[in-house]
Image: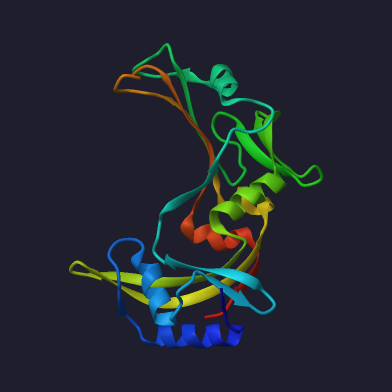
Amino acid sequence: MQKRTLAQIKKDLKELSAKGWIKSNRKHNTGIGKTLEDYLGITENNIALPDFGVMELKSQRMNTISMMTLFTKSPEGITNAEIRKRFGYPDPEFPKVKILHQTISDGKKNSMGFQATIDEKQGRLLILKKGKLLGHYRLAFLKQKAIEKIGNGLILVRAETKKIGEDEYFHYKDAYILKEIDPTKFLAHSKYDIRLGVYHSGVKAGQPHDHGSAFRLTEKSLPLLFKIHKKIL
């Protein structure tokens, strides 16, 4: 594991940003991370910083609209099969099969009355239907799954991007130290999707298809999940 001081990281990132537009060292999505590592002389993704501990180096395109799935799991207290049976509606092509596609954003009640809310006293995120409890997720579980997906200590470097012909170029513009995921922020910055459908083709056509219940967020919302949010570039 590479050890660097925070002052060294800041200096290296400032010099990199001052270079302006840099041609990607690799094609496709991973080019932004590979180019950053090459210019910083980093061979491992983990950096040990005094006062912050082990930090994972991540990079991100500033204009991204991509969504990432943190995890997929039905809530405790109710199964997806029961949710489908109680609240589903007929599929247009296979009306004998109930489907249910619902999105909860910002914890607000949606058009079918589904809602999510935080109960900090009990340490749970509650899934409600017209105010009645359907199921829940433990906040400790949400934090654990988010850590598994994105890590609990990050140096996030963001870049503007442009294409010239087949080549992508990056201008690394800002960077943050992110530490301590806060599961109570999930509602404000992620979407909760219930995705219970049906196969429309192939040998399974007409059979129920359970995509699961998923927490998803835009990549640009990633920093907002952390308690410590320190700008270093």
The location of residue 1, given as percent across then percent down, is: 56, 73
Colouring used for the render = rainbow
Which residue is more in the foreground, 152 or 97?
Answer: 152
Is residue 188 visible in this depiction of the protein?
no
Is residue 92 visible in this depiction of the protein?
yes
Q: Left or right of 173: which side holds 130?
A: right
Q: Among all residues in the image, which is located at the extreme top? A: 96
The location of residue 203, given as percent across then percent down, is: 31, 19
Task: Classify residue 15 by image quadrant.
Answer: bottom left
Q: Among all residues in the image, which is located at the extreme left? A: 165
Q: Is residue 191 above or below residue 80?
A: below
Q: Is residue 231 above or below residue 201?
A: below
Q: Among all residues in the image, which is located at the extreme front? A: 1
Q: Is residue 187 above or below residue 72?
A: below
Q: Among all residues in the image, which is located at the extreme right? A: 121
In the rendered picture of this protein, how many numbered marks are placed on residues? 0
What residue is shown at x 27% (from left), y 65% (from top)? 27
Q: Is residue 48 above or below residue 30?
A: below
The location of residue 142, given as percent across then percent down, is: 65, 47
Q: Left or right of 56: which side holds 52?
A: right
The location of residue 191, given as percent across then percent down, is: 54, 45
Task: Classify residue 118 by image quadrant.
Answer: top right
Q: Left or right of 150: which side holds 131?
A: right
What residue is shown at x 60% (from left), y 37% (from top)? 109
